[in-house]
Image (cartoon, grey):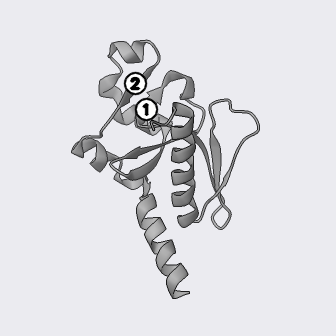
Amino acid sequence: MKLTSDAVEVVNRNALVTVALNQGYNAYLPVYDNGIDLILLNEATGDTRLVQLKGRWTIDKKYIGRNIWVAFPDRGVWYVAPHDEMLRLGERHTGTDSWAKGTYSKSPLSRADRDELASYRFGDPDTVMDDAAKLAVDG
């Protein structure tokens, strides 16, 4: 059975929340989605991220200047990066027809892209699940 796009979004949101919990964040769903799919809050540090969930690396004109972080998977690893930083890294794509219409996305990331985004690597849900399973057995 092939999942609908809505079902894929739910699976992706749950995978991201799993990784976020492991990084010390709690996830909150906004009542109204105006470009923000969820809010990640690390109460210990006060770090708050307004997150737009995507299925791949994506920049969009409607997110510019809004302090939105884009969360997306690539090769099983989640990245959570500030949109405007992604825009700076993706300047070479802003001359495309797609960007002229307002958005640009790409998948999979190149090695250079992964290197540029290394500091925004958020985690791998499989690793988190394996660690949780070990704790359940050992604990």
Q: Gap in Å between the C-alphas at discs 1 and 2?
A: 6 Å
Q: Quadrant of residue 136?
A: bottom right
Q: Is residue 108 left or right of residue 39?
A: left
* Above/below status of 136 relative to 109: below
- Give x and y (percent) for residue 121: 40, 54
Residue named by callout 2: 104
- Give x and y (percent) for residue 80: 48, 48
Q: Is residue 69 left or right of residue 118?
A: right
Along the line of sight, which residue is nearer the eye, 75 or 95? Answer: 75
Q: Name the secondary structure under disc 2.
A: strand
Q: Residue at x 45, y 21 (%)?
A: 103
What crowding class fits label 2: few (fewer than 14 Cα within 10 Å), some (14-19), or many (20 or more)?
some
Which one is earlier in the sequence, the residue at label 1 or at label 2?
Answer: 1
Q: Residue at x 47, y 17 (%)?
A: 102
Residue named by callout 1: 58
What crowding class fits label 1: few (fewer than 14 Cα within 10 Å), some (14-19), or many (20 or more)?
many
Q: Which quadrant of the figure contains the N terminus?
A: top left
In the image, farthest residue toward the front = 1
In the image, farthest residue toward the bottom = 138
Q: Which quadrant of the figure contains the C terminus?
A: bottom right
* Above/below status of 135 relative to 95: below
Residue type at mark 1: give it: Thr
Proximity of marks 1 and 2: CB atoms separated by less than 8 Å: yes
On residue 43, which mark appears?
none
Count of numbered circles on the image: 2
Q: Name the secondary structure under disc 1.
A: strand
Along the line of sight, which residue is nearer the eye, 75 or 41? Answer: 75
Along the line of sight, which residue is nearer the eye, 3 or 14? Answer: 3
- Give x and y (percent) for residue 20: 55, 58
- Give x and y (percent) for residue 4: 52, 32
Q: Residue at x 74, y 33 (%)?
A: 32
